[in-house]
Image (tube, rainbow, N blue to C red):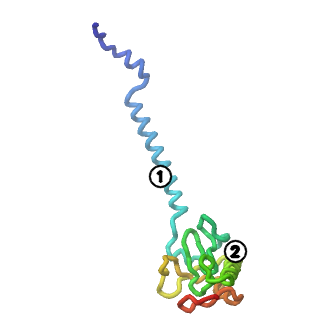
Amino acid sequence: MAKRPPRDNVLEFRTGRDPGKRAGRRSLALLVAGGLLVGILGGLVGIYWPFGSASAEARTTHSFAVCGMVRRTCVVDGDTIWLEGVKIRIADIDAPEISQPKCDDEYELGIKARDRLVVLLNQGDFEAVTIGSRDEDQYGRKLRVLLRDGRSIGNQLVAEGLARTWSGRREPWC
C-alpha cells in the first residue's frame, strides 16, 4: 500500500486554529484560573485566621450563644468562651463545671452561670484584656479579663453567686 504525500492544507483545515494562538489562550486560561484560586484561598484565610493577643484586647461586639458543634464565637461554660475562633479562659473567676461536674448542684449552677454569661456578653461591646505576664493556661486557652466600661464581666457573675473570684486554684462546688 502506497503512502500518501502529506498535504499542508489538510492539516490547517482540520485544526482550524493556529497552534501559537491555542497555547496563548491556554496560558491565559491558566492565569485566570490561578488568580481566582489565589483570591478564594486568600479570602478564606482572611476570614478564619485566628487573631493574636494584640487584637484580642480590642473592643469587640459579637453575638454569643451556647457553643454547639461549631465553636467560633460562643460560650462553653461560666468561665470559658470562644471569640472569633480563639478559646479564652476568663482569668479573674472560677465557675462551676458543666462537662465534668462533681455533683448535680455544680452542674445546675454551671448551666445558670453559662446562660447568664451569654446574656452579659450580648449586652454590648467589651474588651478582652491580658492580666499579668501569662498569656495562656496549661490547656492553650488565652487568659483574659473581660471588661465593659472598666468593670469586670466576671465580677458580675461573682456578685450574682454564679462564680467565685479566682484564687489560683479550683475549689470544690459540692
* Residue visible at 63% across and 71% down in the picture: 74
Task: Determine the secondary structure under disc 2.
Answer: loop
Three-letter code for the amino acid on which mark 2 is drawn: Asn
Near mark 2 (Cα within 10 A), the count class, few <14, some 14-19 or many ≥20, is some
Instruction: State the image coordinates of residue 47 (x, y, percent, origin top left).
Output: 55, 62
Instruction: State the image coordinates of residue 70 (x, y, percent, origin top left).
Output: 60, 64
The image's mark for residue 174 is none
Three-letter code for the amino acid on which mark 1 is drawn: Val
Near mark 1 (Cα within 10 A), the count class, few <14, some 14-19 or many ≥20, is few
Residue 104 location, quadrant: bottom right
Nearer to us in this view, 18 or 90: 90
Q: Quadrant of the N terminus?
A: top left
The image's mark for residue 122 is 2
Give the number of the mark in front: 1 or 2.
2
Q: CA distance from mark 1 to mark 2?
A: 36 Å
In the image, farthest residue toward the bottom: 167
Q: Earlier in the sequence, mark 1 or mark 2?
A: 1
